[in-house]
Image (cartoon, helix red, strand yellow):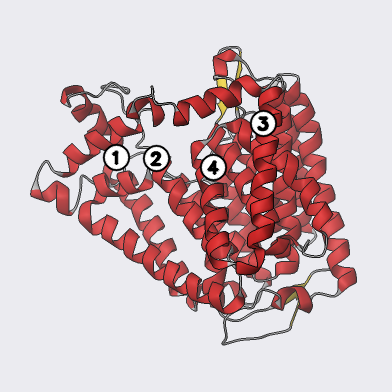
Amino acid sequence: MDAAGQIAGRPLNIDDARSSMAPGLYRRFRRRLIGQTLLCVIPSSIVLWFGNANLAGAVFWALFCFLYFRLLFLGRPLELLCFIIALAPHITLLRGISFYYNAVVILLLIALVAYGARSRGELWDLLRSNPLVIGLLAFMVLYYVATVILIRQYDTNLRLIDFALMVVVVIVVSRVRGLLAPALLGLLFSAWGVGFAMMGNISQSSGSRLGVMVIDDYSIGNPVSLGTPLALACLALILDRGRWLHLQKKPLVRLILVIPTFALLALTTSRAAWLVTAVGFLVALFLDRRSRVRILLLIGMGILVMQIVLLSPFGTGLQAGLDRTFSDERTTANRTSGRSDQWRVSYRAVNASVGSMVHGYGPGIGPLVYARLSRDTRGVVYDVGGESQLHSLYMQIGVETGLIGISLLLLWLFRAGFRILQWCRRNESVFPLVCLLGYMIIIATVSGNDLVSGTFLGLALFATLRGHTAVKET
């Protein structure tokens, strides 16, 4: 592995890394990565289409581990990191199926250690020179350690480490954007694979929603877990004229990719994913004047695609999602799938005492607090008495760490947002800012401790980095 093209001490430009890669090297890398991604996606998706989740998991993890360790032994850690990004939707869906659930964090850690060992200190320099990244990692690690100490369970909040490692993976890859583009294309194809496989298994028992399937009374997947990578792919295709996928000169290709992506996104009926996409479009309309007409046309095309989906055999699920979101007959609890009940209980928990307001109940204690207070909180009907995970990172941090924790989180987000906005104005780009806003929306509805949320935040933090190294892999 040779390092070339060092441009230290200044913010990265959107096209720095692309120009630093030889065209032949980029084309070979792209073909290789997409090929390996499809090799994992296609067989497992076909098996999943026929409703055999256990076999789909076995096929996927066998192929994934073979290619993972092959890249590891060939000394291609950067390609391995891209491979992980590309398969994030499949990893999220099939972790724990025919494979040890928490092995994902081990695989992420091994890949980063392998990269750090071959990068001759570049990974350490990257982290050391970026306080925002160091602050995020420190917060996540300390939060996890405190959870283990308080409740004596190693797997509670372990996904915080998943998330933090994925942020670092994306940041490392995004510094060489010749690697980032095929990784994001692979993520698109992986999300397609999950979506098309589940189209054969949509049923009334799953609420006619794409992203969750019920097999032998066992439910796998989540509409949010499928909707968020589709939203990310949709925004990458449309914003900044597709430069983040190196498709700025191929509008027809982008259009061909956008149509099925948007159709699958609509079928998930994931309100979080819909909101991420809508906010991305609004930000682009406000900040990217040159693209306003094109984005308005694409919005019109999206509405047309939704109308076509409504007329299709899958239209029932989409109509139910629209009614669930916009119908005047729905209550707040119905619209938010019980999240309003959790907010009500959380508000009571935070205001129970001065201590609970200032420092909270302690990391990992949130579900126990909900189980205790939901029994006697007036009007609550969602999972009363159950140790329900709090469906928002803001809610979780507020209950478990009080004003101290939530203030640190909001201060960090504000600082990151300011840096990212400056970069976007300087580089006439909106994608990193939209990724940050998308992440902030996601964690308002779920905890966001997953690989795709880490991808959102990692792409956003690209705009806060300084220095650039293009790396060749042979």
Mark identifier at residue 273? 4
Q: Position of residue 125 (x, y in %)?
A: 55, 78
Which quadrant holds residue 345? top left
Q: Position of residue 122 (x, y in %)?
A: 61, 76
Q: The residue tagged with tag 1: helix, strand or loop?
A: helix
* Of pointers 2 and 3, the one earlier in the residue sequence: 2
* Of pointers 3 and 4, the one earlier in the residue sequence: 4
Rounded to the nearest whole Å, what is the CA distance between mark 3 and mark 4? Answer: 19 Å
In the picture of the structure, the residue carrying the numbered disc 2 is 156
* Of pointers 1 and 2, the one earlier in the residue sequence: 1
Of 147 and 356, which appears nearest the observer?
Answer: 356
1 horizontally vs 103: left or right = right
User: Can I make out residue 413 in this image?
Assistant: yes
Closer mark to the observer between disc 1 and disc 4: 4
In the picture of the structure, the residue carrying the numbered disc 1 is 151
Q: Position of residue 41 (x, y in %)?
A: 76, 38
In the picture of the structure, the residue carrying the numbered disc 3 is 307
Check if mark 1's residue and mark 2's residue have beta carbons within 8 Å: yes
Mark 3: few, some, or many residues within 10 Å (few <14, many ≥20)? Answer: some
Residue at point 38%, 25% (across, down)? 334
Q: Most extreme residue toward the left, as rendered?
A: 354
Of 2 and 460, which appears nearest the observer?
Answer: 460
Q: Amino acid at mark 2?
A: Thr
Closer mark to the observer between disc 2 and disc 4: 4
Check if mark 2's residue and mark 4's residue have beta carbons within 8 Å: no
Residue at point 16%, 24% (across, down)? 376
Q: Position of residue 394 (x, y in %)?
A: 33, 48
Q: Amino acid at mark 4?
A: Ala
* Of pointers 1 and 4, the one earlier in the residue sequence: 1
